[in-house]
Amino acid sequence: MEFTGEVNKKNVVVVGGGASGLMAAYAAAAAGKSVVLLEKNEKLGKKIYITGKGRCNVTNDCTPEEFLAHVVNGNKFLIRSAYRFPPSETMKFFESHGLPLKVERGNRVFPVSDHASDVTKSLERACRDSGVEIRLNEVVCEIVNENGAVRSVRTTARTYDCDAVIVATGGLTYPSTGSTGDGYAFARHAGHTCVPCVPSLVGIELIEDVAVAQGVSLKNVTLTAKRAEKGVYREQGELLFTHYGISGPLVLTLSAMINRIPMRELEFAINFKPALDEETLDQRLLKDFSLRKNEQMKNVMRGLLPAGAVQLVLNASRVSGIKQANAVTKEERRRLLLALKALPLRPKQLRGFQEAVITSGGISLKEVDPSTMESKIVKGLFFCGEVLDCDALTGGFNLQIAFCTGYAAGASA
């Protein structure tokens, strides 16, 4: 579309129709402002549709303190907005706008319908009922600032004179949904600095070839990460081997903790049998070897591990899979024990933004007021959601960041 030169006057312009933008638009309109929401896609909330595997984990039914404890970057910055609009308020908002909710394992909150589309519909309904004007397929070209204050927003179709602009354009994850970094460009143009963006809540590629274990899912294993012999992560849970390396709940959490550390400085280890100490596990090996002394090791080890994982452990301990159990030496048994208790792995790199759940990095929090989400550089310019340098673990916490920062920005704009 060509720019027509048409000018509209609005109190507040919200750029981006995702979770934080919709909440911000609602909050601004509920406060009595004249609001227009601009979305470059053909529909609202495209990323919402794919969250929670299409079910949308809208928040976590927890206290503000528990929510903040799950924030990896920006927890101090979020204190005021978290108490102003905590998870309980998020739940109340959705249920009061016609979306029944349910709480599942880990206090994860989902719509009763299990349809993420209903979350978007509820947010859109709240906005329209409050008088928000929604314009789809409208691309913002520039946020115009004069004398240190917002003046207008220029799109491919028209110009909106305004008192405030809320940038809610998301991060870089799932670029097909429209998250292409527009907000960072707007922020830099206004004089803001951005913390370099990296993928978070994503699988990790390994230097080691683990293709033999592709598809193997393990429960109740312990994954650890060290940097210069100092522990940076240790959790027990579920892990999945893939064609490129490792994924699953443990790995997604690990990625959030290490994504700003050079991969070459890290070492990982998997403890396949955390419930057994080394002595007990060694006695188990001796027992298995004795009972199945004439069988090949690749079969004997199946008593402890799935087939794919067996080959990984045998490779790491340099024990032949076709060797008979009664021929395994004491030194080989020691190496098997070490591989079972601490299989060494070296990270190569994180998987890309196209697979990551969330972006880590973004607009520097030092330059944003934590109470209002207003820029400390340009009056009337606000930021919320994933565009900020805030991110959290899985479980509904990242959407809660979107909602509490969106509400703070909208109510303050």
Image (cartoon, rainbow, N blue to C red):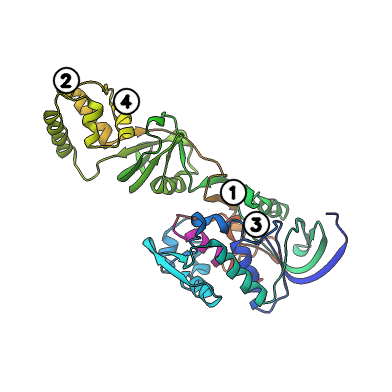
Residue pictured at 46% horizontal, 33% vertical: 264
Q: Amino acid at mark 1?
A: Tyr
**Mark 1 residue element:** loop
Disc 2 vs disc 1: Cβ atoms closer than 8 Å? Answer: no
Q: What span is in magenta?
A: 395-403
Q: Residue furthest bottom?
A: 32
| Mark 1, residue position | 174
- On the rendered structure, is 216 left or right of 78? left
The residue carrying mark 3 is: 169
Pick whichever of labels 2 and 3 is earlier in the sequence.
Answer: 3
Give how far apart the Cα atoms at labels 2 and 1 are.
52 Å
Residue 66 position, x and y percent, is 40, 64
State which tag comes first along the sequence, 4 or 1.
1
Marks 2 and 1, the one that precedes in the sequence: 1
Q: Which residue is mark 2?
A: 327
Q: What residue appears at the point 41 percent right and 29 percent down from the top-left corner?
A: 208
Do labels 2 and 3 touch, CB within 8 Å?
no
Is 402 included in the stretch rendered in magenta? yes
Q: Residue 83: in sight, yes or no?
A: yes
Please rate how many residues cluster around mark 2, counting C-alpha atoms within 10 Å: few if below 14, some from 14 to 19, many from 20.
Answer: few
